[in-house]
């Protein structure tokens, strides 16, 4: 169960894994996520389904190594298995009836944006992709995005690849040039989604964001992932993860995301030390 | 001649100031001598009110008579006829409002310690019986059970004993439902739950963890595509309730579900696990039920210096078991009764700094028969805190309802099911436990699982 069929490092901190999970592959849709545990005493973490192969019965996850759990996950090799994997969870992204969409991906969030762009493209929607990274070394999924986009803009913060600037700069340029979108789908760091939403609000374009809150069960049981949307409390796991970007309280979401930062940092160091010891 | 002592044999327990720093079981269980002595307090009354007081009608006087004679395994077998989880119910059943409430000995003095005897007999069985249960001959007919809490485990066990090929689908990675994620180790050791689950496996029950019905697979797919002839829904009441007061999304505000899941299921109290939990020093738990007591006592064990229970009615109305309230008090939990939170206060980083409460007084009785709490004008006051845990109830998760066409539910989400069969508005679909009643007790859920197993067996036999 949950065997790792393929593992690939997309950049020094981002890894792709294809995992054997026929029931999830049969049902999964872009926008949905899985919860996984790497090992017996591990925590449960949510990861968005980056791709799926219904025939092969596999799903793909793409993750950035940010803490103890993703570090441990990254130490798993092809042929090994995950402890637990459950899904598909959350509501699939709504793509029906969209004629022209700007898909904005930031950093590892691009991995979540990609399957949506792919689905839009497959149903004949005109897709403009704007993907942004800090620097050239961190660029991922460039070819994949190109293949499903009618137009693609690559930006890096430092200008080492593509255009220099932020995704919001690139999006603004397109909007100012007169591009009309039914919808903007923005997935990346919360701060990026906040500023994309602020920008599109001015242009009055519906904007959907994907919220990656802290979760435990992923089925609506704990309420850990709650966020404020249009003044109401929502659970990212069952009401989302997609929400109207013009209604999300991003500042609160950013703060909630830091709840366990100290603990996570310490755990990450502990795990790293453990692996270093193994190497010695 | 019966033992006419007016008092129950006391339950040996860990010292409160020792146990509030560890997660080992609080109550240590009767010794054989205590059990023998307590059993002789039973008068074996002819009208046996205790049997009617038990939701699953265990023949209580009969098992106690056997206990008094030292025939503990025989005593166990009498309980096992009606209960699938004696070691669990002996620990968590609210006996004081069921069997022991109507015990004749309780008219003058304390009732017989029925729950303590049940626990003794069940633990003795676990310790001494080494042979594994025999897997019954299969009748080749498949039944699906959704959820592995008390309702699901019971339903699955009863059907497996009749030869059905039972598969339990569990959403989490460990089976046991609320027995594992909700009730803490110090009240119900997980090894006991595991033993009950092992018995089911010996009986041939398949348990598929990590399966969220309604997402991974739907009820209709189980019936139409996967060859199950009936489905029992025992998915519990897992949806947390919040108060909808300002500050509830601050960092440091937990639902009791989240807090208890981190502690119990994910074992955040152990240094060898990766799940984080806040290191709190001042904690308020809002609510007065068993879940509130559990959360408060967990917080204390995790090192909090001050732990408050905030409840809007008085001590008399506390829904928690008297024993749990007593244990909580002994462990140093501070009760702020007749108080209702109006908002949670936070700092610039959105971390909890306190809770503002309004004092209450009791007015006229409401629909529940309890006196309605009425706010005392201008009585606002603040407790400085870093953590708030909301333990004000749960409701059934809407996932199964929303993905199963024609399955009728109450407005508040409970699945509508006939009593006692558990038949729902859909053919071949049964339901029971908290998914039907809303949050209730382990024993009621177990009883519902039992009745549904019987009804499913009757339906499938009739259709043969």
Image (spheres, coloured by chain):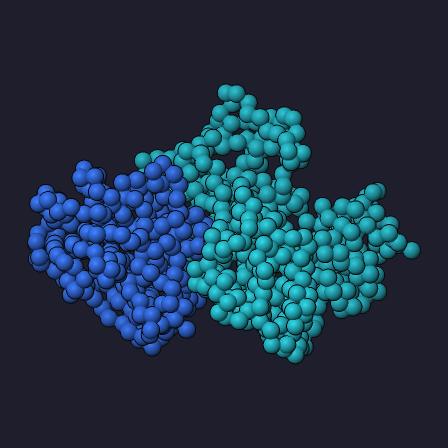
Chain colours: A blue, B cyan
Would you say residue A3 is visible in this rendering? yes
Is B88 left or right of A279, judged from the image as shown? right
Q: Residue furthest top?
A: B378
Q: Is residue B173 above or below residue A171?
A: below
Is A106 left or right of B18, judged from the image as shown? left
Residue A241 in the image: x percent, y percent? 34, 51
Give the camera-side residue of B406 and A26: B406
Is B268 left or right of B444, judged from the image as shown? left
Give the camera-side residue of B397 and A160: B397
Examine the image and state in which quarter residue A96 appears.
bottom left
Residue A44 in the image: x percent, y percent? 40, 59
Residue B194 in the image: x percent, y percent? 58, 66
Q: Residue furthest right?
A: B1
Q: Residue at x 50, y 70 (%)?
A: B226
Q: Residue at x 47, y 52 (%)?
A: B402
- Number of dots carrying numbers: 0
Q: Residue at x 18, y 55 (%)?
A: A126
Q: Which corner quadrant holds the N terminus of chain A?
A: bottom left
Q: Is residue A265 above or below residue B241?
A: below
Q: Which corner quadrant holds the C terminus of chain A?
A: bottom left
Residue B242 in the image: x percent, y percent? 47, 40
């Amino acid at each position: 169960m949950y065997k790792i069929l393929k593992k690939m490092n997309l950049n020094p901190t981002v890894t792709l894994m294809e995992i054997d999970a026929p029931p999830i592959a049969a049902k999964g849709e872009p926008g949905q996520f899985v919860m996984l545990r790497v090992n017996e005493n591990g925590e449960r973490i949510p990861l968005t389904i980056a791709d799926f192969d219904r025939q092969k019965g596999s799903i793909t996850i793409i993750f950035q190594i940010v803490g103890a759990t993703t570090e441990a996950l990254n130490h798993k090799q092809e042929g090994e298995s995950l402890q637990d994997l459950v899904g598909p969870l959350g509501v699939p992204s709504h793509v029906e009836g969209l004629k022209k969409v700007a898909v904005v991906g930031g950093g590892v969030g691009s991995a979540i944006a990609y399957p949506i762009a792919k689905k839009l493209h497959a149903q004949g929607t005109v897709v403009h992709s704007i993907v942004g990274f800090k620097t050239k070394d961190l660029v991922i999924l460039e070819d994949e995005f190109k293949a499903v986009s009618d137009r693609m803009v690559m930006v890096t913060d430092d200008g080492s690849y593509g255009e220099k600037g932020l995704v919001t700069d690139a999006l603004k340029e397109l909007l100012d040039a007169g591009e009309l979108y039914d919808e903007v789908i923005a997935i990346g760091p919360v701060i990026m989604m906040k500023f994309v939403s602020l920008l599109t609000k001015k242009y009055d374009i519906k904007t959907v964001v994907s919220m990656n809150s802290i979760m435990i069960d992923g089925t609506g049981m704990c309420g850990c992932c709650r966020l404020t949307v249009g003044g109401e409390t929502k659970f990212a796991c069952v009401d989302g993860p997609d929400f109207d970007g013009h209604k999300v309280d991003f500042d609160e979401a950013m703060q909630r995301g830091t709840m366990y930062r100290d603990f996570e940092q310490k755990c990450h160091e502990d795990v790293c030390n453990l692996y270093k010891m193994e190497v010695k | 001649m019966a033992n006419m002592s007016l008092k129950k044999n006391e339950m040996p327990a860990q010292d409160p100031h020792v146990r509030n720093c560890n997660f080992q079981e609080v109550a240590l269980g009767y010794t054989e001598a205590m059990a023998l002595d307590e059993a002789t307090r039973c008068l074996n009354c002819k009208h046996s009110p205790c049997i009617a007081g038990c939701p699953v009608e265990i023949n209580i006087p009969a098992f106690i008579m056997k206990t008094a004679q030292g025939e503990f395994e025989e005593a166990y077998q009498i309980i096992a006829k009606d209960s699938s989880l004696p070691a669990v119910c002996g620990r968590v059943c609210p006996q004081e409002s069921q069997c022991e409430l109507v015990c004749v000995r309780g008219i003058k003095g304390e009732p017989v310690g029925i729950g303590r005897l049940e626990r003794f007999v069940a633990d003795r069985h676990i310790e001494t019986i080494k042979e594994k249960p025999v897997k019954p001959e299969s009748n080749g007919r498949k039944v699906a059970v959704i959820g592995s809490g008390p309702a699901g485990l019971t339903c699955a066990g009863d059907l497996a004993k009749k030869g059905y090929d039972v598969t339990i689908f569990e959403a989490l990675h460990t089976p046991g439902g609320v027995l594992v994620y909700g009730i803490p180790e110090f009240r119900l050791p997980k090894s006991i739950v595991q033993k009950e689950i092992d018995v089911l496996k010996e009986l041939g029950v398949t348990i598929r963890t990590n399966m969220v019905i309604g997402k991974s697979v739907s009820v209709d797919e189980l019936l139409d595509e996967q060859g199950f002839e009936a489905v029992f829904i025992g998915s519990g009441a897992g949806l947390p309730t919040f108060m909808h007061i300002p500050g509830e999304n601050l960092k440091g505000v937990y639902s009791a579900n989240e807090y208890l899941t981190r502690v119990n299921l994910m074992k955040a109290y152990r240094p060898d696990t990766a799940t984080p939990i806040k290191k709190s020093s001042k904690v308020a738990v809002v609510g007065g039920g068993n879940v509130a007591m559990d959360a408060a006592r967990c917080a204390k064990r995790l090192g909090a210096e001050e732990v408050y229970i905030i409840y809007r009615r008085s001590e008399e109305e506390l829904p928690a078991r008297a024993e749990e309230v007593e244990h909580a008090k002994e462990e140093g939990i501070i009760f702020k009764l007749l108080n209702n939170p109006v908002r949670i206060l936070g700092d610039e980083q959105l971390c909890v700094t306190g809770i503002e409460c309004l004092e209450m007084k009791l007015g006229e009785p409401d629909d529940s028969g309890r006196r309605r709490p009425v706010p005392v004008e201008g009585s606002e006051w603040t407790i400085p805190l870093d953590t708030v845990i909301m333990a004000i109830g749960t409701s059934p998760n809407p996932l199964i309802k929303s993905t199963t066409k024609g399955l009728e539910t109450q407005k508040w989400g409970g699945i509508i099911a006939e009593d006692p069969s558990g038949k729902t508005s859909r053919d071949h679909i049964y339901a029971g436990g908290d998914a039907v009643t809303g949050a209730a007790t382990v024993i009621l859920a177990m009883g519902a699982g039992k009745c549904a197993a019987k009804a499913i067996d009757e339906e499938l036999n009739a259709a043969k």
